Amino acid sequence: MDKDELIERAKDPRYIRGIYNYCDRWCERCTYTFRCLNYAIGEEQIDDPEANDISNEKFWQQLSDVFEMTRELIQDTAAETGIDISAFDPDAVDREKDIESQADADLLSHISEKYYESVDEWFDRNAHLFDQKEDEMNRIRLISAKDNPEKEAAEIRDVIDIIKWYQYQIHVKIRRALESALHEEMEEDDFPRDSDGSAKVSLLGIDRSIDAWQVLASHFQETEDSIQPLVKLLGDLRRRAETRFPNARSFIRPGFDEEP
Ligand code: SF4
């Protein structure tokens, strides 16, 4: 697909513009796949085994086409907005480095980092519990035709999937929110703030993770003491993120927060 074809496809009213900018990227669970151009393009590539094979020329050709298309789109946008991208600004590199270091040093970054590390440690420490649970469920299956442990197993699997899906994303989105906020300090405009949108995605991940941990704790009573510190950490992160980004919760994400 070339640039013109992409622009043409993006005009299709079936697609919600920019919906993929503030989603959680969990396409398997997304109810908007039909309205997402990003998803449609991804599916077309999945359907083509040659385009997914790193040893196939088609894979590299497609990657090269994507870079070329991105370059052309940036050039067009720069021309439309009167920005000269050929003019190298040496200060810009230093500014970017400075923004990255400030975001790195931010307490929100540290807390979200601590969270994803602690989640890995928790699963390493408690892996045996899942084996025990499986044995227990197999026993129930043998002794009772009436009790159905499948439902409990499905619920446990579901909350673990949720915790793992957001484990790193919470940090990534908080980082992006912090960096965007620093960029926005230098730009005076009335556009919706990327920092708020990114913080909202992180907050929603925190909400879902807290609920998931609580459900997990209800299935493994013996883990309650080890789960509570993680929930507390997330609660602390949520409170601080809401204070830092007071408009995040009211940010309107394309598609998800709009009337159908
Ligand atoms: S909007 Fe939905 S389908 Fe599109 S990238 Fe995000 S999660 Fe996937």
Image (cartoon, grey):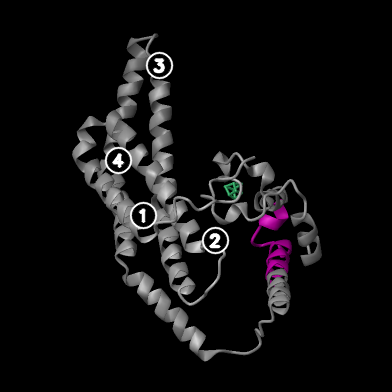
Badge 4 vs badge 3, beta-carbon distance below 8 Å: no
Label 3 packing within 10 angstroms: few (<14), some (14-19), many (20+): few
Query: Picture coordinates of residue 55 (x, y %)?
Result: 66, 62
What is the CA distance from the residue labelled 4 to the residue labelled 3?
A: 23 Å
What is the CA distance from the residue labelled 3 to the residue labelled 1?
A: 41 Å
What is the CA distance from the residue labelled 2 to the residue labelled 1?
A: 17 Å
Q: Is residue 189 left or right of residue 233?
A: right
At label 3, the amino acid type is Asn
Instruction: Give the mark nearest the N terminus, 4 or 2.
Output: 4
Quarter containing the C terminus: top right
Residue shown at 52% from the left, 74% from the top: 188
150, above or below 52, in the image: above
At label 1, the amino acid type is Glu
Residue at mark 1: 242
Q: Which residues are magenta?
A: 49-67
Q: Secondary structure at mark 1?
A: helix
Residue at mark 2: 192
Residue at mark 3: 148
What is the CA distance from the residue labelled 4 to the residue labelled 2?
A: 43 Å
At label 4, the amino acid type is Ala
Residue at mark 4: 127
Between circles 4 and 2, the one closer to the viewer is 2
Q: Secondary structure at mark 2?
A: loop
Label 2 packing within 10 angstroms: few (<14), some (14-19), many (20+): few
Q: Secondary structure at mark 3?
A: loop
